[in-house]
Amino acid sequence: MQYLRLYLLLLCYGIVAEQIEDHANEQPADFQILRFNFRNVQAPYVIALWLVVAALAKIAFNLSRLSHYVPDSALLIVVGILLGLLLHKTQTDLDYYSLDSHTFFLYLLPPIIFDAGYFMPNRALFESIRSVLLFAIIGTIWNTFAIGISLLIMSNYGLFSMSFTTFEIFVFSALISAVDPVAVIAVFEEINVNEFLFINVFGEALFNDGVTVVLYQMFKAFAIIGSDNLTIGDYASGSVSFIVVAVGGAFIGVFFAFITSLVTKYTQGVRILAPVFIFTLPYLAYLTAEMISLSSIIAIAVCGMVMKMYVKGNISHAAANSVKYFTKMVAQSTEIVIFMFLGLSTISSDHHWDTLFVISTLVFCLLYRIIGVVAQCYLLNKFGNGNQSKEFSKVDQFILSYGGLRGAIAFGLAASIPVSIVAKPMFVTTTIAVIYFTVFLQGITIRPLVQLLKIKTKEERIPTMAETVYMKYLDYMMSGVEDIAGQRGTYSFVEE
Amino acid sequence: MQYLRLYLLLLCYGIVAEQIEDHANEQPADFQILRFNFRNVQAPYVIALWLVVAALAKIAFNLSRLSHYVPDSALLIVVGILLGLLLHKTQTDLDYYSLDSHTFFLYLLPPIIFDAGYFMPNRALFESIRSVLLFAIIGTIWNTFAIGISLLIMSNYGLFSMSFTTFEIFVFSALISAVDPVAVIAVFEEINVNEFLFINVFGEALFNDGVTVVLYQMFKAFAIIGSDNLTIGDYASGSVSFIVVAVGGAFIGVFFAFITSLVTKYTQGVRILAPVFIFTLPYLAYLTAEMISLSSIIAIAVCGMVMKMYVKGNISHAAANSVKYFTKMVAQSTEIVIFMFLGLSTISSDHHWDTLFVISTLVFCLLYRIIGVVAQCYLLNKFGNGNQSKEFSKVDQFILSYGGLRGAIAFGLAASIPVSIVAKPMFVTTTIAVIYFTVFLQGITIRPLVQLLKIKTKEERIPTMAETVYMKYLDYMMSGVEDIAGQRGTYSFVEE
């Protein structure tokens, strides 16, 4: 229980630290040796502290038995809720601690998507590209319109406690339709399904972002402009923008991947700096796409996928390993922080609970997901999915339907709905409810279901002795060459 | 020249990106597919872009011949000045691009100092601890008072164009007296002097922070309170605070090092998260010390020094290597950004040039540094420096005097002088002048001088074959154990 005590200690210390008043800007009456000045260091302090708390929570779960039954993401949400309640009790201003959509999209999301792109099994993705794109494009559009129209019809009968316009409900149905890559990674990494299934669910989650961004932004703009002021041209450009946003995002990704490959070629003289480009340039791809309203998720994922083929040859073995390790570490860190913040934001958001609206949304999400998957799999099995050897079995279709998890991206989009849409609190509350349903109910039951349905899991093989020896031989040779060539880190002087 | 073209391309693109107007908050009249919204992504964009530009500049130098004669830090300052002039010409608001002291102390400085602590040769430091502490404490106090009093006397004769009070000039003399660890690393890493000399210069630069913080904060507080309102108690607490600030900082460092060692013990289940603690907890040590006005530099340096003895056993070999690589990479990145920002800030600061004040400060800095070093070395040689085998030779004393480089910390402190001190522009200008003198003149001439004086450089030895084989054998065994134990990164599923 030592870690638990430590955890509580750190927590209390964080809360105490926050409550220390800021005396810095007052005129000092006399000279004090120690002056408390929390405001000055607040921004990095809170982030670093939350990261430590989330990582400690994750470690505590893994030491306990709980993690065998409940996914870490669900447990982290609970920790976030408890923290939120605690901070709420102590009258702390929760605004500093909740997940604003700006932080989420600019800082927390990019590392996870870059990691996904950089470690994407490119070959497996291209083998399933037809089904992935079908699910991502047609599937997402189908879900958005089916859910939106169904909720609109119910609203016209006056069944909900808040009213909304056509475009407003489509803003909501667009954000609630997208399968979330972070949730998919978090849940699927614990159950080890086979690569074919994983690629289909995860590829869809990654590439539906282009569609979601367009639908969400388009309906948001339409809702603000108002249907009376819309012209045929607006509808036309809305339809064109699917292609522009997705292909434009991919183009930016390829462009930055090209620059990264080019620049890392010249880093032989300053080898320690090569990874700087490998991390910074994809991030710039993400921000550039975000800046000109293209799909930033597609941009950074494509950038990671394309550049990994080229940069590995340009950097040293040690650098490549460190890049791999570090990418995983940052992605994992932001993932745990996201789920903890989701719990925290539940406490700090403005809520409006409408039981019928929540249940209807949940039912429509599940129902149309199943209809969409079954219909699309029928087409793919009939006309070929580009991957002759594999067909979508009934069990595959069940996992595809069940794996349509919703997550933090939906919450981020819900949080950035303009306040002029009066039903925003109801949309936010329902989004959180759907995410909880997804992460808790589906996340907890998917492992027993996978075992029950005897789904072929990923082949676990231990490298043969010959392979191991060969890899080690390569390492040995590379580092021998480095020693002889005398190429060392520029800081070698300071090293022990 | 391909990299140069690329460099210019990226530069132009950065400037263009900045000048794009922000249309996001305007009410959209019609639906646009692409909307430019730079303000939204500005903060991370500018940082990432500057990092890329600085890294490209460093790579370009290393491909050219220039880097054989001029230290990279000097060249990066020139790049910063050129960028500043370019941005100034294009009427860009330079405030977004200059180095504010907040960014410098909270984000750029900690990685460098952590790196210094983590890679500190502990044994060599403790062998020279007496001389290091003497230089850091007595040397810094001596320089502060000698420079301050000399300038005050000249001011009383009305020789300077701006007047200042006693406490105000001591604020300036405190910040200009401290040898800068970043400048010392940047210049000394290129000349490879022997470890004994390096440890003495670098150890002083690291540990004089406690003294500098106290003197600077104390005189700043005194200057604001005014000499009429000061009590005996204020002077007394000023004197006590040396011990509190330095020892308190060290205590915080040890405390966080202890927590890091404890926590990393339990990371076996989630090994990918171990480095999160190794980076985050020392940073929290730094911020905690900063928050309660203790020496944050001493805190994070001590934290790095202490924890490295314990954490290495708690984390995997791959994790340890990645931590090492990544620490160096981040430290090197922030170092190049600091020097580029120094150049940039030269353009954006308010200046007041007083030739006599600048020259007097330079002369006093050099003169009192030499007097201080010679006197202290005399004492150390006479009464023993705790390291029987080594005495400070005449040549050592010359390098110690000449290596008293000033750098970005002085600028950061100058930038945070309260505006109520009217001579602030003159202090800022003079600080920049002293830093330039240090980095350019001393930085460029120190290598030829070291060669001329035949100073014993660091022993460069290639590991014997036996050592190499033994190390490789260890690696092999460790990874064999890992393979058999089946402990792998939690993301192994996504891996190719």
Image (cartoon, coloured by chain):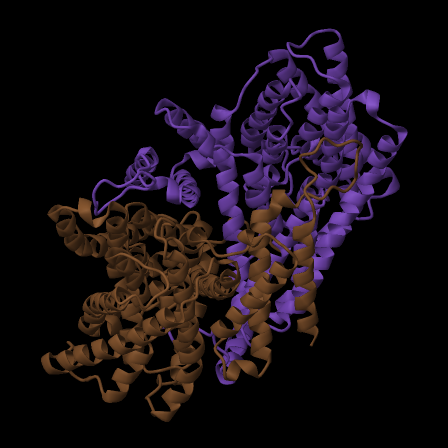
Chain colours: A purple, B brown
Quadrant in which the N terminus of chain B appears = bottom right
User: Farthest residue in the front direction?
Assistant: B158
Determine if residue A371 is in view: no
Report the number of discs: 0
Q: Residue A313 lies in what quarter of the image?
A: bottom right
Q: Is residue B296 left or right of residue A139?
A: left
Residue B321 at x, y percent in the picture: 44, 64
When the figure is inspected, residue B364 is found, relative to residue B106, above or below; the finding is below
Query: Along the line of sight, which residue is nearer the eye, A367 or A268?
Result: A268
Residue A131 at x, y percent in the picture: 78, 42
When the figure is inspected, residue B434 is found, relative to residue A22, above or below; the finding is below
Determine if residue A254 is in view: yes
Residue B475 at x, y percent in the picture: 43, 69
- Residue depicted at x 75% and y 28%: A219
When the figure is inspected, residue A110 is found, relative to residue B449, above or below; the finding is above
Q: Residue A6 lies in what quarter of the image?
A: top left
Query: Along the line of sight, which residue is nearer the eye, A78 or B325?
Result: B325
Q: Is residue A162 left or right of residue A59?
A: right
Q: Residue B430 lies in what quarter of the image?
A: bottom left
Query: Along the line of sight, which residue is nearer the eye, B465 or B10?
Result: B10
- Residue depicted at x 60% and y 13%: A354
Residue A492 at x, y percent in the picture: 42, 75
Query: Along the line of sight, which residue is nearer the eye, B399 or B456?
Result: B399
- Residue depicted at x 61% and y 51%: A114
Quadrant in which the C terminus of chain B appears = bottom right
